[in-house]
Structures are given as C-alpha cells and as structure tokens.
Image (cartoon, grey):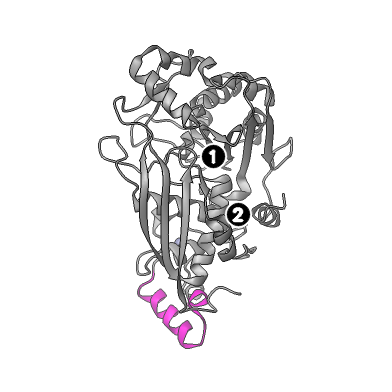
Amino acid sequence: MKMGEQSYERGKLEIRLKALTPIWTGGVQGINDCLRETGIAGSLRWWYEAIVRGLGGTACDPCKHIHELYGKSLQQYKEALRQGNNWWQALDTAGLCDACKIFGTTGWKRQFQFKIRDETRLLWEPPPDALNVRPPDRTRGWFMSPGRVERVVLQFTGKNEVLGQLASLFLFVEKWGTLGAKPQLGYGVFQVENREAVKSRATKWTQKDNGLPGGEDNCPDLRRFGFFRFRFRPERQNWWSWLPALERLLGRTDTARVLKKAAEEGMVPVSPVLKNEWRFNYWKGPFRIERWLFGTSLGKENRVRSKIGASWAYKNGDEWEVRGWVWFPEQDKEKRLIPGEYHQQIWEAVRDVDLWCAALKVKKGELQTWPDVELWRKWQPDEVLSFLEGRQ
Ligand SMILES: [Zn+2]
C-alpha cells in the first residue's frame, strides 16, 4: 500500500514497553518525576528523520523551520487535493518533508496522538540524585541520574498508515535506538512486550529518491551511522564491582545502595567507562574534532552532543549486553570537513573486542557491528534498507 491511499481510516496502536535501561524524559530539578510526551515524541522524530535521510529521502532540521504550511504552500496543498492527490502526495507538492508530514510543523499538526499509561518508577529514590561515575584518570566523571524503569503502555491513535510507520519505527528503535533523552549515556533502551502485535501492523520501509545527494549537512542520517552490540556472560554475578569507576561508589553507603539495587535489576551504568576508554585512552586528534565527535557540556550555549552513544549494561536472559551507535558527521558545526581518519579511529575503537573486555573486566564476549567492515564508509540507501529489514 502506498502512503495516502487510505487517507481517512483511523485506528489505534498500542505499544507495551519494558525499560532495559532507565528512560529519561527530563524533569524538575534533575528528577525525572514522570514520563513526558514531548521527550518521547522528540526522540521518535529524531530516529525517524535519521531513517528517512538514510533511505535517500528528505527530512528537514526541525529547528530551522524550513517547511511550513501556510500562504503559498497551503494553496499548493489544497490545489493538489482538488486534483485528486491523496494527503501525502499533496504535502509533497507543498514541499513538506516526510518528517514534517508525520510529526507536524507550523500549519500542519502531528498526525498521531498518544496517551501514556505510565507504570514506571524511578530506578532509585534519591538521595543520591545521581551517581558520579568517574574513571580513576578523570577529575569530573559523568553524572548518572536514576531515570524511569519498568513498564509503560503507549496508546496511539491516528490514520492507520501513519500508525503503520510508527510500528516500524518502534521495532527499529527497540533494536538499535533509544527512547527519550540522554541517548549518549545509554538511557532509553527498551523491549517491546507485544512485539508480534506491533509487527503485524508495521509497514515496510521503502527507498526514497527526493533527498539531497550528500544528505543534510549536520543532521543524523543512517547512511553515516555505525551500530555495535557486545554480549558477555560474566563469571561473577558482581562483575561490575571490579570496574574502578564503579568500585569507588561502593565506598559510600548511599551510592553503594543504589548501585547494587540497579545491578540487581539488571542495569549497570557502564557507558562512562566505555566513553572514557574510547575518548581518552584510544582516540588521538585535534581538540576541535574531539569536542565535535565526543561532545562537551561546557556551558549551555556551547554544548555539543556526543556522536557516540553506548547503553548501560543490561541483562538479557543469562547474558549481559551493551549496545550503541556512532554517528559520523561529514562536517563540524562550522562546516569544516572532518577527515575520514578520525571516523576510522573511532570505528576501530568500538570494534576492538580486547578493549571491550579490558574496560568491562570480562574474559570474553561477542562483539557485532553494523556494518561489519573494518574500514568504515558511508552506506547507500539500499544498504540502509536491507539493514532496516534485518537482512544485514
Ligand atoms: Zn520538514
């Protein structure tokens, strides 16, 4: 079925999730007091845009307000409808990108609504407000807030074809993405509990041909991503207590209590440990590129988001798992080209199984990356498509 063919048939889609790592949707005074709709919708749009661009289509940067439906574009939309086009095609004529069509923009509302049945709770009740995970060679470390765990039910309503796309999006995000904020620190990994029902609603991804050849300047694009997953069976149940950055936290009653509790629930905040290895012990290059790729929290204005996200370690049956992604942007903020050798360094670091084992103090583990290549290169839309379909 092509988009737009069943324009007015509305339906429902229920997605039941269980958090595998805490979900963070922002909150008052640093405490994520409930799951927020904006935090969930924002992360869904971010991944949807990355997919659309990766498949060769266009998705605008929502901060730039490029696509709006009023004045001339609104006239074009109405005219296209009059000529018998469906809503999707009519919005094409009006110049809206696929992300704006579904997630909305000025003059065009979001094409789905949802209610949250929030059955989550904080991973731990403060104090402490956060765990300061600080590897021995760092002065500051990373602050990990509790976030929300357990179950949540999302009840979507909207046109069936839009819900079909959302179902596909959720299946992708479940496998490789994250929900909510702080993806770089590994929050928001989840499992879809009613996967079969969601699968039966999912529409197939298709390649698109209306995108810019090189992709949008600084926007996430799956063609410029790499994904990784490390699975291990630790010999000791408290394997994590051998990591110096976490061992430190066992020295205080309050931090020891919440760390042990988190580990008992199958969630261990190892993302800082890995990021520390990759950034400070492996990567070598100019500071401006380092900042752009690994991020910085220096002041709100200059804040740069890390282009690498690693999850917490979470329990998956008898095994533990850590997964994540690297986004290799072509240019930095000032549109200066980032030489491929720097991408390659990061790619080699995430593909280094010895580094994983040493960082997590485990004897062995199974490391998989997509793409499974030694030399990272940008992917073509058809390769992105087969990745989305699970063929790669
Ligand atoms: Zn747009």
Position in image of residue 199 (x %, y %):
59, 60
- Picture quarter containing residue 386? bottom right
Nearer to me, 2 or 260: 260
Q: Residue at x 58, y 47 (%)?
A: 175
Q: Is residue 62 visible?
A: yes
Disc 2 versus disc 1: nearer the observer: 2
Secondary structure of residue under mark 1: loop
Within the magenta stretch, is there residue 314? no
Q: Which residue is mark 1?
A: 336
Is disc 2's CB within 8 Å of ligand 1? no
Q: Is residue 135 visible?
A: no
As drawn, the residue found furthest toward the left would be 29
Q: Which residues are magenta?
A: 69-90
Q: Is residue 188 left or right of residue 342?
A: left
Mark 2 and mark 1 lie on one chain; the one further toward the N terminus is: 2
- Picture quarter containing residue 61? bottom left
Within the magenta stretch, is there residue 71? yes
Q: Residue at x 53, y 21 (%)?
A: 240
Report the label total.
Answer: 2
Nearer to me, 200 or 375: 200
Question: Amino acid under label 2?
Answer: Gly
Question: Amino acid under label 1?
Answer: Arg
Position in image of residue 302 (x %, y %):
38, 35
Q: Main secondary structure of the magenta part?
A: helix
Q: Which residue is mark 2?
A: 54
